Image (cartoon, rainbow, N blue to C red):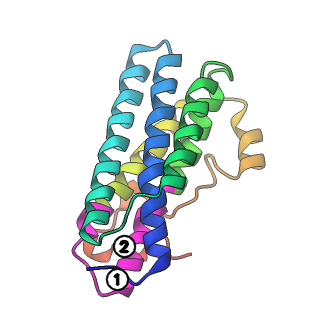
Amino acid sequence: MNLDHPRLVDLLKRAYSAEKAAAFAYIGHAGSVRNKEEKKAIKQIEIDEWGHRKEVLEIMQQYNIPVSRYYEIKYHIIGKLIAISCYLIGWFMPFYFAGRLESGNVCEYFVMMHYFHELGIRKHDKILYEMGIKEKEHEVYFLEKIKTSKLLPFFEKIFNWGKKKSYNDVDLDKKYPVEESDIYCKK
């Protein structure tokens, strides 16, 4: 079966390749931190990103969606550059930008779910929900690490993410179940 939904097809292709970029970035991030607990947590997030990539590929294969060579090359380079930069830009920025990135990734999976629903397909709801929630957990982890930094208010003002701003409307303390998660990321 092929999907007649160009935005969904493109989003799946981008998500698949972007997960590799994120995993590469977390390899650099984990390598750049000294704290063993932070290193372990970031390594787990890297593992989660590889898992998301595998899950997205499985969905793509069900609909004969090829991997985008363009996105693979683009995000490979981006991920490697971010990984290297983690050793150069200090402690705060890798945590900040990882949290900001994860904040946007939350909606990526809920928007995929919305697009599948437009086609009457609900069989991927559970895995897309789980990946979206996992991305939210990642966002919360990174924000927790920087929430007391004096740099956060400045970065939040410039980059629109932080304690008062998020790129998604998911609240882990008041999660909707999968069946009601259509409400997420409608804007």
Q: Secondary structure at mark 1?
A: helix
Please tell me whether residue 17 is drawn above or below residue 178 in the rendered image.
above
Rounded to the nearest whole Å, what is the CA distance between mark 2 and mark 1?
6 Å
Furthest residue in direction left, as rendered: 123
Magenta segment: does it hold 129?
no
Label 2 with label 1: CB-CB less than 8 Å: yes
49 or 60, which is in the foreground?
Answer: 60
Q: What is the quadrant of the C terminus in the image? A: bottom right
User: In the shown orientation, is residue 18 left or right of residue 121?
Assistant: right
Label 1: few (<14), some (14–19) or many (≥20) C-alpha neighbours in 10 Å: some
Q: Position of residue 25 (x, y in %)?
A: 51, 33
Q: Which mark is residue 113?
A: 2
User: In the shown orientation, is residue 80 left or right of residue 8?
Assistant: right
Q: Which residues are magenta?
A: 105-128
Q: Residue at x 40, y 84 (%)?
A: 4
User: In the shown orientation, is residue 113 left or right of residue 59?
Assistant: right
Q: Quadrant of residue 129?
A: bottom left
Q: Position of residue 78 (x, y in %)?
A: 59, 40
Please tell me whether residue 86 is drawn above or below residue 153 in the rendered image.
above
Q: Which mark is residue 185?
A: none
Q: Which residue is label 1 attached to?
A: 117
Q: Position of residue 84 (x, y in %)?
A: 59, 24
Q: Quadrant of residue 57?
A: bottom left
Task: Residue 149: tell me if it is visible.
Answer: yes
